């Protein structure tokens, strides 16, 4: 579980548990990590979080998302 005073890096694994406060902190950390790495995609991240994506070209955003969160290797 994370706390407000925790110093997290973009490579920390976050397990969301506890209550709403812990979930909010985890989401804030993930969003800030995204904005730090892809500042040009901040508006698209906001659109995605609020569900305002209908009729918008989200391909650059999805490409950046794939770069940051590469799919796992195939299980054998």
Image (cartoon, rainbow, N blue to C red):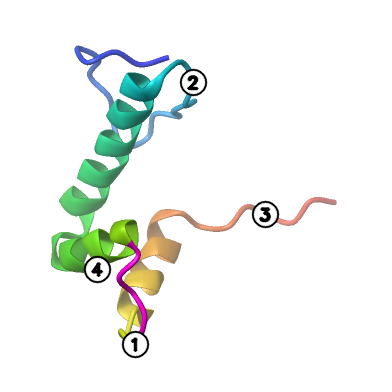
User: In this rendering, which labeled residue sits more in front, label 4 or label 1?
Assistant: 1
Measured Cα–Cα span from mark 1 to mark 3: 32 Å
Q: Which quadrant would the N terminus be assigned to in this image?
A: top left
Foreground mark, 4 or 3, reads 4
41 left or right of 16 in image: left
Q: Earlier in the sequence, mark 1 or mark 3?
A: 1
Q: Position of residue 73 (x, y in %)?
A: 67, 54
Q: Earlier in the sequence, mark 1 or mark 2?
A: 2
Q: What residue lies at 57% left-to-right and 58% top-to-bottom? A: 71
Residue indicated by mark 2: 17
Residue 24 image offset from top left, x and y in percent: 30, 30
* Helix, strand or loop under label 2: loop
Q: Which residue is mark 4?
A: 44
Q: Residue at (44%, 28%) from the top-left corner?
A: 14
Question: Would residue 70 be counted in the magenta stretch?
Answer: no
Q: Nearer the viewer, mark 1 or mark 3?
A: 1
Mark 1 residue element: loop
Whichever of callouts 2 and 4 sits on the residue coming sooner in the sequence is 2
Q: Is residue 1 left or right of residue 72?
A: left
Would you say 73 lies left or right of 57 here?
right
CA gap, disc 4 and disc 1: 12 Å
Q: For residue 2, what is the image quadrant?
A: top left
Q: Residues within 10 Å of mark 1 (few under 14, many from 20)?
A: few
Q: Which mark is residue 55?
A: 1
- For the residues bearing labels 3 and 2, Cβ distance under 8 angstroms: no
Residue 52 is a magenta residue: yes
Foreground mark, 3 or 2, reads 2
Picture layout, residue 51 above or below residue 56: above
The label number, if any, that marks residue 21 in the structure image: none
Graded by Cα atoms within 10 Å as few (under 14), some (14 to 19) or many (20 or more), the crowding at tag 2 reads: few
The residue indicated by pointer 3 is 73
Viewer-proximal residue, 22 or 60? Answer: 22
């Amino acid at each position: 579980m994370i706390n407000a005073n925790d110093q997290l890096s973009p490579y920390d694994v976050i397990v969301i548990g506890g209550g709403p406060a812990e979930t909010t902190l985890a989401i804030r950390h993930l969003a800030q990590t995204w904005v730090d790495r892809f500042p040009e995609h901040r508006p698209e991240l906001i659109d995605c979080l609020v569900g305002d994506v209908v009729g918008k070209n989200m391909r650059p955003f999805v490409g950046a998302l794939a770069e940051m969160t590469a799919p796992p290797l195939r299980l054998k």
